[in-house]
Image (tube, rainbow, N blue to C red):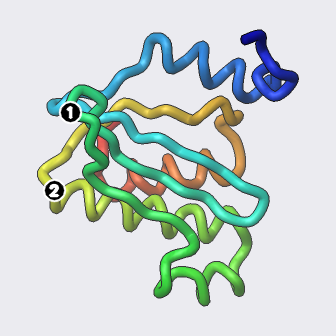
Amino acid sequence: MGRSRFDMRPRLVRHRRVREQVSGTADRPRLSVFRSSQHIYAQVIDDEAGHTLATASTIEKDVKPLADKQKKAEAAAEAGTRLAQRAKAAGIKAVIFDRGGFKYHGRVKALAEAARKEGLEF
């Protein structure tokens, strides 16, 4: 089968290129970010075991009412803070950041900086 036109989207090309080199381990899992038009999702993943260790997003029940009233970058920062707290509770101190082919700007940057501020190293 050949490539479809969806395989050639610039973000997916960037994401695939990065994922060839970035992989999470048990010692240093991967912090993966996905940004949709309304929400942002983040997970800490151990790629060797194939397990998700911690997650956070702006669609969680206790975050969504706040996210609807805040700017998107502020809601992303809240998700980053919660992700870092959950990762630390799971014993994770350092991660490898995978921005998912998105530019390190706006909501992705807000999430990353909030996670760093909460004590997660990358």
Q: Position of residue 92 (x, y in %)?
A: 19, 46
In the drawing, what numbered circle is on residue 74? Answer: none
Q: Is residue 72 above or below residue 12?
A: below
Residue at (58, 82) in percent of width and height? 64
Crowd around label 2: few <14 · some 14–19 · many ≥20 (10 Å): few
Residue at (26, 43) in percent of width and height? 51
- The residue under label 1 is which amino acid type? Ala
Q: Position of residue 69 (x, y in %)?
A: 71, 86
Q: Secondary structure at mark 1?
A: loop
Side (left or right) of 78 relative to 76: left
Question: Reading the chain from its start, which is encountered first: label 2 or label 1?
Answer: 1
Q: Nearer the viewer, residue 121 or 42?
A: 42
Residue at (60, 47) in percent of width and height? 34
User: Furthest residue to the front?
Assistant: 1
User: Furthest residue to the left?
Assistant: 91
Q: Compute the Cα span from label 2 to label 1.
A: 15 Å
* Residues at discs 2 and 1 in contact (Cβ within 8 Å): no
Q: Which residue is mark 1?
A: 49
Q: Mark 2 or mark 1, which is nearer to you?
A: 1
For the N terminus, the image quarter is top right
- The residue under label 2 is which amino acid type? Ala
Residue at (55, 18) in percent of width and height? 18
Q: Is residue 95 above or below residue 90?
A: above
Q: Nearer the viewer, residue 75 or 49?
A: 49
In the drawing, what numbered circle is on residue 90? Answer: 2
